[in-house]
Image: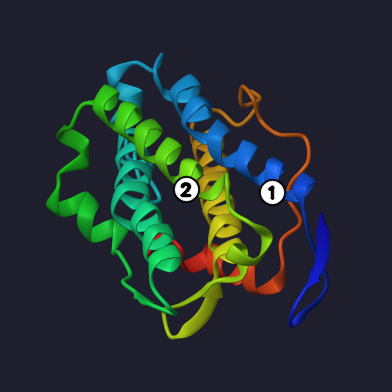
């Protein structure tokens, strides 16, 4: 199964692409748990000197964006015709919800649960369902672009965490290849956490 996507010459939607994308999305909670579960408390809650999230804040950010952003966006795209999707201010949530004071285990468990639910919605989709669209941050985004942006958003956090935690060590389970990203999916990845 593969066809060129309408309006996206040269971008092929194949069963292999979908499987690889879903595998990347499914692996993120496992990768996050492997990175953070053995960190000492001081490292887990250490805010980088130049700013940004402490590792515990990354975990809660990924949990909240999955639960209140990605999962709900996927459901709405599948249930509604061209819905307008809300942005989420991740930095505001971190401050208001006091991520630094929260427990890691809950963030990891709930990120895994919501991600499994998101992948469960995406897994059985027919090829044409991936082309369903929504408005997000004043532009049209299809479900394929949203799912790809989710994987890129996860990866951006893993890259940052890896650099924060001593960049030399290889992330357990890090993929050796990436899913091809369209220009629109790449730009969506920059805003998907909003």
Is residue 74 shown left or right of residue 56?
right
Residue at horizontal 38%, vertical 44%? 62
- Residue 124: percent from left, percent from top: 57, 46
> Residue 48: x percent and y percent?
38, 42
The answer to whether residue 119 is left or right of residue 65 is right
- Image vertical order of residue 41 relative to residue 128, above or below: above
Left or right, 7 with respect to 75, comes to right
Mark 1 — residue? 18
- What secondary structure is found at the residue carrying circle 1? helix
**26 versus 66 height, above or below:** above
Determine the residue located farthest toward the bottom in the rendered image. 138
**39 or 37: which is nearer to us?**
37
Decide which of 33, 122 is in the foreground and name it: 122
**Picture residue at 31% right of the left edge, 48% below the top:** 67
Quarter the N terminus occupies: bottom right
Residue 57 falls in which quadrant of the image? top left
Q: Which mark is residue 43?
A: none
Which label lies toward us, 2 or 1? 2
- Neighbours of disc 1 within 10 Å: few (<14), some (14-19), many (20+): many
Distance from disc 2 to disc 1, alpha carbons, whole Å, reads: 13 Å
**Residue corresponding to mark 2:** 121
Disc 2: CA contacts within 10 A as few (<14), some (14-19) or many (>=20): some
Looking at the rendered image, the quarter that the C terminus falls into is: bottom left
Percent across and percent down for residue 158 are: 54, 39
Q: Nearer the viewer, residue 159 or 2?
A: 2
**Residue farthest right in this picture:** 10
Q: Please, is residue 55 above or below residue 75 in the view?
A: above
The mark nearer the N terminus, 2 or 1, is 1
Residue nearer the viewer, 123 or 36 = 123
């Amino acid at each position: 199964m593969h066809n060129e996507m309408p309006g996206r010459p040269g971008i092929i939607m194949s069963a292999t692409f979908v499987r690889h994308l879903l595998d990347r999305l499914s692996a993120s909670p496992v990768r996050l748990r492997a990175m953070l579960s053995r960190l000492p408390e001081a490292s887990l809650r250490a805010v980088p000197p130049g700013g940004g999230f402490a590792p515990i804040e990354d975990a809660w950010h990924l949990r909240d964006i999955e639960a209140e952003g990605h999962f709900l966006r996927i459901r709405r795209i599948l249930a509604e015709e061209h819905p307008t999707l809300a942005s989420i201010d991740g930095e505001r949530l971190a401050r208001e919800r006091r991520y630094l004071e929260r427990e890691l285990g809950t963030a990891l468990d709930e990120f895994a649960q919501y991600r499994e639910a998101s992948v469960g919605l995406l897994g059985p989709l027919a090829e044409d369902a991936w082309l369903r669209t929504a408005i997000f941050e004043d532009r049209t985004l299809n479900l394929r672009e949203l799912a790809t942006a989710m994987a890129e958003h996860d990866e951006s956090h893993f890259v940052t965490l890896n650099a924060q935690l001593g960049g030399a060590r290889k992330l357990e389970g890090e993929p050796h290849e990436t899913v091809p990203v369209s220009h629109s999916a790449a730009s969506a990845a920059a805003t998907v956490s909003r």
